[in-house]
Amino acid sequence: MNIRLKEFKEKLHRIYLRDFPESERMPYYMIKKYYKNKKIKILALKDERRNIVAYSMITEHNGYILLLYLAVLKDKRENGTPTNYEFVGELSKKQEKAMNELLKHDIGVLCATTGFGKTVIGAKIISKLKTNTLVIVNRNKNYHIF
């Protein structure tokens, strides 16, 4: 293994230990095994100085790209801009449960079927957090990562 690749892997491991909450971590030996067996891909996200600021692990299943993990370095996260949005609707019990699970973490992915109420849950979360929020929606089911 060349030195740059070894240094990169060591840096990713340090980021994993420091920036993934322990309760959300997949055991590292499994990550290494899945990576070696080409079951996952690891994508590093870099800033303009080419420093790693985040990384994600993805896998493909039935033609879909699935995001397994996303870690943003703690010192690169921002608190956002304060907001004062008020949620005036009601969530179903299932939506409430999904929202409460998401609120246990400072970063997350909500994946649910069409009509579940992902947008409504997102609106309620934004009103509870009182800060601006990044929401990424993929409307194309047939996308590929190159």
Image (spheres, grey):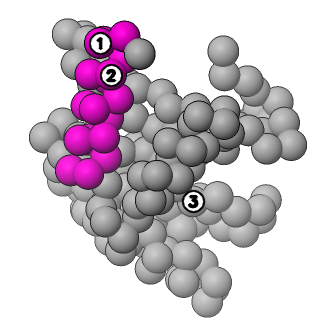
| Mark 1 neighbour class, 10 Å CA radius: few under 14, some 14 to 19, many 20 or more | few
- Which image quadrant is residue 129 in? bottom left
Q: CA distance from mark 3 to mark 2?
A: 33 Å
Between disc 3 and disc 2, whose residue precedes? 2
Within the magenta stretch, is there residue 140?
Answer: no
Disc number for residue 110: 3
Residue 81, image x, y percentages: 19, 46
Q: CA distance from mark 3 to mark 1?
A: 38 Å
Work out whether residue 80 can be spotted.
no
40 with respect to 114 (left or right): left
**Residues under numbered marks 1 and 2 in contact, where contact means CB atoms less than 8 Å apart:** yes
Image quadrant in which the C terminus is located: top right
Between disc 3 and disc 1, whose residue precedes? 1
> Which residue occupies 26% across, 51% down?
17
Disc number for residue 3: 1
Give the residue at mark 2. Answer: 6
Residue 57, image x, y percentages: 52, 40
Q: Which residues are magenta?
A: 2-18
